[in-house]
Amino acid sequence: MLSSLPVDLKKVDSKNIDKEIARVGMIAELDAVSFYEQLAAMATDSNLKKVLLDIAKEEKTHMAEFETMLLKLDNEQIQENIKAKEEIKKLTE
């Protein structure tokens, strides 16, 4: 689990700090999704399982919010996402 920053933000150039913060936020939310889904898979109480899966879904929304912000901040990321979609399309058709 992410309990500390995976990157030393003090060492990040000030022009890139917001992009890195968004990326760290994405990492934390993806970690949370995985955590809650694993707990849901182990839960024996059906109501607890439902709650955990609902929380995991909310974390996916948070991750998407960080991704949306990153795409507003990083034009290179937009271009790489376009390339990735093209690659995946070729590989999966």
Image: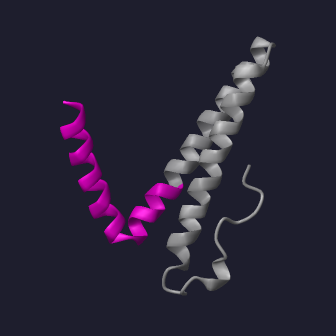
Tell me how many marks there are.
0
The answer to whether residue 86 is magenta is yes
* Residue nearer the viewer, 34 or 62: 34
Please state the horizontal and vertical placement of residue 68, each as a whole percent of the image.
44, 57
Residue 38 figure quarter: top right
What colouring method underlies this structural image? one colour
Q: In the rendered view, does 68 fall on the left or right side of 82?
A: right
Q: Quadrant of the C terminus?
A: top left
Q: In this view, does 61 lie above or below 82?
A: above
Q: Residue at x 76, y 21 (%)?
A: 42
Please state the horizontal and vertical placement of residue 71, each as a whole percent of the image.
39, 63
Residue span colored magenta: 66-93
Q: In this view, does 11 lie above or below 87?
A: below
Q: Is residue 67 above or below residue 50?
A: below
Q: Which residue is drawn at 67% across and 76% down?
A: 8
Q: Residue reaching furthest front?
A: 91
The answer to whether residue 34 is magenta is no
Q: Residue at x 62, y 42 (%)?
A: 59
Q: In the rendered view, does 28 fall on the left or right side of 86?
A: right
Residue 4 figure quarter: bottom right
Q: Residue at x 24, y 32 (%)?
A: 92
Please state the horizontal and vertical placement of residue 12, each as a whole percent of the image.
57, 82
Predominant SS of the magenta segment:
helix
